Amino acid sequence: MKIKYLLPIFASCALAVSTACNELDGDNSDFDFGDFRTEEKENPYENGFGRLDGSIRLATYNTHRCAGPSPLAVNYDNTARVISLIDADVIALQELDKNTRNNPADQLQELADRTGMLPYFCKTIDYNGGEYGIGILCKEKPLRTYSATLPGVEPRKFFLAEFDNFVFIATHFCHKDDANREASVGIINRYLQTTYSAYTKPIFLAGDLNEYNASAGSLKALFSTWTAVSSKENTFVDTASPRRIDYILVYDGNSPSYEILGSAVPTYDEINLRTVSDHLPVLVDLKR
């Protein structure tokens, strides 16, 4: 399938200088994810990372439980500020607490209150007296939502929200075992083949996929049925060797029609993103 690109990819990621602490078993920051970089192309965001004209914006952001990598202190205002600057129609969020002993609040609701977006939470595990999982913030109410379990050393899920013109799937793949990540791709694909084979609207997958190496089984499986439409800049930066592990992809199985106007790992003068999370956000602008 051919995709029309209008000069999509640009951003810069500096090296982080500290290692995050995280009580949750399976935190990404303990692992080395390799490297995956390409040359920069001409930048459609040279005047800033505002939404491109006539676009719908999708995004993904691992929030690190709304706490910067060091010190590990929750700051909902900072995370919400980043989300507001991104200004996505729909954004997938990973690593969210809900009423845990460490974070006795509904973190997604805290972000929704500060951004004016609609929150949809998907619990992946019971954790520390509360819940932990992924979520979606969106500007319009979805037509439907659906979630299903994925394999993982720590259980995972995919969370689907269908809108008028597209389907958006948020996820956070297993951090330790590529066999689990590859199996997750198969589970999502089988669900789409069963449920959306007759649909023509594009289907997007967004999230922390915990893999950088294109030769890994999970990315081979993904790239055989999906096309990456997001920036190839590094996204996991709390390490001496930053990695690209956060993606936005489009499903090829239903031959969708769409146009990518641009994609970036943005930076903002208003806030230092490396103090907000151990990941950087990713955005994609699609022709409306």
Image (cartoon, grey):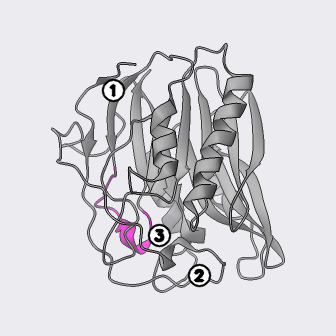
- Amino acid residing under circle 2: Asn
Counting from the top left corner in percent of width and height, residue 226 is at 49, 33
First in sequence: mark 1 or mark 3?
A: 1
Nearest to the observer: residue 223 or residue 273: 223
Please report the residue visible at 77 percent of the width from the left and 45 percent of the height from the top: 148
- Amino acid residing under circle 3: Ser
228 sits to left or right of 100: left
Nearest to the observer: residue 141 or residue 204: 204
Please report the residue visible at 77 percent of the width from the left and 58 percent of the height from the top: 123
> Which residue is under mark 1?
53
Secondary structure that dominates the magenta span: loop
Quadrant of the frame with the N terminus: top left
Please report the residue visible at 31 percent of the width from the left and 78 percent of the height from the top: 240
> Is disc 1 placed on a helix, strand or loop?
loop
Counting from the top left corner in percent of width and height, residue 127 is at 78, 74
> Which residue is under mark 2?
22
First in sequence: mark 2 or mark 3?
A: 2
- Real-space Cα distance between discs 2 and 3? 12 Å
Query: Is residue 263 placed above or below 85 in the rendered structure?
Result: above
162 sits to left or right of 71: right
- Real-space Cα distance between discs 2 and 1? 40 Å
- Residue segment shown in magenta: 265-279
> Which residue is under mark 3?
277
Please report the residue visible at 74 percent of the width from the left and 70 percent of the height from the top: 105
Residue 226 in sight: no
- Real-space Cα distance between discs 1 and 3? 29 Å
- Amino acid residing under circle 1: Asp
First in sequence: mark 2 or mark 1?
A: 2
Quarter where residue 213 is shown: bottom left
